Image (spheres, grey):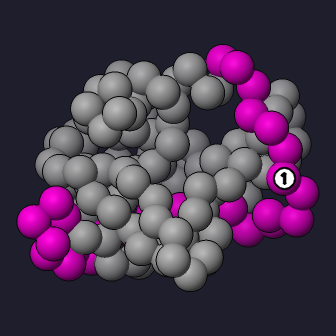
Amino acid sequence: MYYFAYASNLNRQQMVERAPDSKPRFIATLPNFKLTFTARAGRQGGVASITPHRGEKVLGAVYEISERDLKRLDGYEGYPTVYDRRKVIVWTETNEPVEAITYIKIDQSKEVKPSAEYLAVIQQGYRDWEIV
């Protein structure tokens, strides 16, 4: 199955640790969503999520993952209490639609600036994929 990663899960080292069977596949775009940072208990600073927003887009990447990886990601993302797992349609760089699983934070009521350390993990992920 395909998993659409954004923010810190773009970081390839983090994905190796979280989903050992995962295989990086391709860069993708999720249209009509935007990247946000919201509060999460036990964390300093905001954590990433995505919210519907017409005309915006989230750049990310698709990994092929196993059922075992999915269960491990569920644990890291706090599914089903902190993040919900959803099917989305993302678009490849050659403009082909692909169905993938992603995670969206359930409570997004309070935007919070992310910590410098968390941002560094995210920035490394974008560099890993040569998105920036």
Residue 11 location (% of width, % of height):
40, 30
Residue 46 location (% of width, % of height):
78, 40
- Residue at (46% x, 65% y) in the render: 57
Q: Most extreme residue toward the left, as rendered?
A: 94
Residue density around tag 1, few if under 14, some if 14–19, many if 20 or more, within 10 Å: some
Q: Quadrant of the C terminus?
A: top left
Magenta stretch contains residue 110: yes
In the image, residue 121 sits, relative to residue 33, either above or below, namely: above
Residue 90 seen in this snapshot: yes
Q: Nearer the viewer, residue 76 or 86?
A: 86
Where is residue 28, by image quadrant? bottom left
Q: Secondary structure at mark 1?
A: loop
Horizontal arrangement in the rendering, residue 129 relative to residue 124 (left or right): left
Label 1, on which residue?
111
Horizontal arrangement in the rendering, residue 126 relative to residue 110 (left or right): left
- Residue at (84% x, 44% y) in the render: 112
- Residue at (18% x, 42% y) in the render: 23
Given the image, on which type of amino acid does mark 1 rest? Glu
Residue 107 location (% of width, % of height):
81, 65
Magenta stretch contains residue 81: no
Residue 43 seen in this snapshot: no
Horizontal arrangement in the rendering, residue 97 relative to residue 39 (left or right): left
In the image, residue 87 sits, relative to residue 128, either above or below, namely: below
Residue 87 location (% of width, % of height):
41, 78
Q: Nearer the viewer, residue 93 or 82?
A: 93
Horizontal arrangement in the rendering, residue 119 relative to residue 86 (left or right): right
Q: Over which residues does the magenta segment extend?
A: 92-117
Q: Quadrant of the N terminus?
A: bottom left
Where is residue 4, by image quadrant? bottom left
Where is residue 114, by image quadrant? top right
